Image (spheres, rainbow, N blue to C red):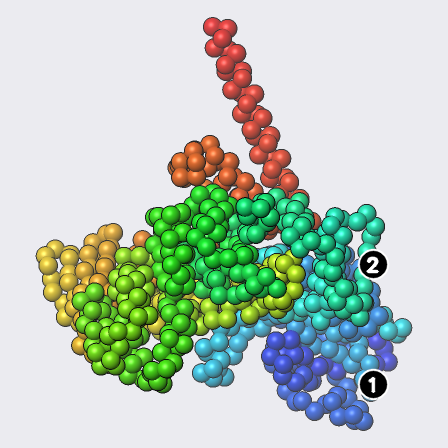
Amino acid sequence: MTNTIDIEEPNASPMIIDEERNGDDGQPAEIATEETAQEAERDETTSQDTAEKGNETPPTVAIVPPEQKDEPATPIHAPKESDENELMNKAVKSEEEAHRLYCEYGHKMGFSVRKGKQYYYVGTKNICTKDYYCSKEGVRDGDKLTDADYKDPHTRTNCKAMVRFRVDEEGSWRVVHMVKEHNHPLVKPEERHLLRSARSHTAGRQRLIDLMTSPLFQAINYGSSPSYSVQQPTQQEVKQIVKSVFIEGSESQSLVNVFKTKGNEDGMFFWDVQLDQGGRMCNFFWRDGRSRIDYDFFGDVVVFDTSLRLNKYNMICAPFIGVNHHWQNIMFGCALLLDDKVESFAWLFRSFLESMGGCAPKSIFTDQNLNLAKAIEEVLPNTRHRIYQRYIHKNLMPRLGSLNLNDSKAFHKMFNKCLHGCDSETELEETWSTMLKEFKLQDHKWLNNLYKMRAKWCTALNKDAYDGGIEWDQRTEAMNNVLDGITDKAGPLEKCVLSVDKLMEDWREKEYEEDLHNAQKPIVCAIRHSDMLNHAAKEYTYKIYKLFELEFLDGCGATFFKETPLGGTLYRFECTNQGRGSKSYTVMLETSEPVQVSCDCKKFETMGILCSHSLKAMSVKNVREIPQRYILKRWSKSARKRNYSLMQYDESEGGSETAHVSKVMRYAYDLVLKSQGHPELRELVWSALEGGEQALDKFGEITNLQAHSLAIR
């Protein structure tokens, strides 16, 4: 039973205002009388007119807030006693400060806040007491759900955590009652700034202030960190500072100063510079420690973009871009190149490999550039080089402008079929030949050269290579204008670097937001009681689940099949998608444990999720869950969780001991990143390190004693 607080006010009685829906739903506050509040046990409210009509006197109701009779919640997380006492002993002077106080407490603990009921003194509009709830308070009324509500992931868990403020005669707001236990997981520290009630309109200004007072900013302006302190500037002062930055010093030296400062601040920061024949710096590469960690998890596919030119030198800004487990863009590093010679690209790829411990990606997507192709063949011989179809489309328009084909739907339909609509090399050859003949393009030099490189761009010729779905339409849209976030394309080099880093941080912020979304909002399956979909919802992130769900629904609801038993538990299925011609795909399914399935469309081999044809066959044979071998960790909710073991230490990174040191350093660095800005987490990291050191020392002492004992014998 949740306790209530008695409010002893002999001359005034409070009325109840229920503002619980003001927190997330944005609906108007509701008013409840004593009777309805007791009948509905705090969740139901009735009329909306009392206390909102300017001059009307509110009716007299309860002198004390009604007893809350909800069943006790099962506590999962509760704050420390010191945290509760700190809040209980705090007094503030206004409703806004009271709300902010509990929001700050919620931010510290890891939950968001919604406004709750409030009580007015009878005959006045003066607040007597006011409640604030955890945003997961209450439950959704299933009888009133619309289709839109049902599809939207619900967030309420009937959490009972709350706080009650009492306002005294002098207008002081003081906490008089608190329920601290939550019945749901709290948000991780690195994601708490994304909580709705924790967001502040001053956050952007504070980030700018942090930038102005950082050693990095000072290094750019002065070449080194000054010894004096910098006061927090006003917004007008910040504008003036931004206008006056980067006006002195050599650009190359200023850029090196930036890299040196970053290296001092980030122990895993990597940078490299190439010198020309005259000893002048001409090409630059850098990546931070977080990019190295990201590459461990998602470095299987890389897009190398050379389309952006920066600065008065027209330098190539070339980021290495990947895809995380939410199908979002992430950056593994970036380069500034003075030219696009083979030597420059080869130097860059060697630096990139060195920064990543010698681990090359499985596939790399680039522009249609011969020098790039030569450098990749030289430095990354085991990486599948692909020409990104987005770049082909971009180059196609100016090449065909004089032929009036850009508006030809028939031409573009055939051209797109050659890119990603063919299933075999024979089909590609027939389609390409027909296209050239029909539009009289047999002698078109650019198209003929493009066809010679068909192994690098045609999906039919790359079904054996994993690409992470890079060529899917949705991913292509996400890659379009990916570097538009770099705002200053004409400024000094060091400012361009800061713009790239800002873009990288924005992408990381989006990943944090998606992590929070996945942690706080359960996935609602299109078929609620489907074992297969529920298993997928448990394993995959929201975005990848939606891709899987489309395949599942397409397979089970829009695919014809013909089943042929091959003996025992082995079956062959011929599957045809409805409404997409007569093309048939062959699925081989082994239903005995471990379940094995393969399809000649090769979606799993290229994308990493099962195709509609495989899911159709599995559904027909009552396979209820996704076999574990077909769940790629890089698409799962646990993609960033490490699982180190001694068996992982091989010689792929230059020797077992070198690999061991490198992996332990990255693991420790990852822990440091997670503890940034949180004193309690930093203490946990130090405690863990000290415990490990003590265990190592103890093991060393035992080993020495054993060796000494053997020597005596």
Secondary element at image label 1: loop
Image spot of residue 681 (x, y percent): 64, 48
Q: Residue furthest top?
A: 713
Tell me the distance, in whole angstroms, between the alpha carbons under discs 1 and 2: 46 Å
Image spot of residue 292 (x, y percent): 52, 49
Quadrant in the rendering for residue 473 = bottom left
Secondary element at image label 2: loop
Quadrant in the rendering for residue 125 = bottom right
> Which residue does the numbered mark 2 point to in the structure image?
231
Closer-to-camera residue (45/85): 85
Image spot of residue 320 (x, y percent): 48, 57
551 sits to left or right of 43:
left
Closer-to-camera residue (375/280): 280
Q: Residue at x 41, y 63 (%)?
A: 367
Specify few, some or many for label 2: CA neighbours under 10 Å numbering under 14, 14-19, or 20 or more.
few
> Which residue does the numbered mark 1 point to in the structure image?
124
Specify few, some or many for label 1: CA neighbours under 10 Å numbering under 14, 14-19, or 20 or more.
some
Closer-to-camera residue (533/633): 633
Image spot of residue 559 (x, y percent): 23, 74
Q: Earlier in the sequence, mark 1 or mark 2?
A: 1
- Residue 10 in view of the camera: yes
Tell me the quadrant of the picture where the N terminus can be found: bottom right
Q: Residue furthest right?
A: 170
Closer-to-camera residue (428/598): 428
Q: Amino acid at mark 1?
A: Thr
Q: Residue at x 69, y 77 (%)?
A: 117
Q: Residue at x 18, y 72 (%)?
A: 430
Quadrant in the rendering for residue 364 = bottom left
427 sits to left or right of 362:
left
340 sits to left or right of 492:
left
Q: Amino acid at mark 2?
A: Gln
Viewer-nearest of labels 1 and 2?
A: 2
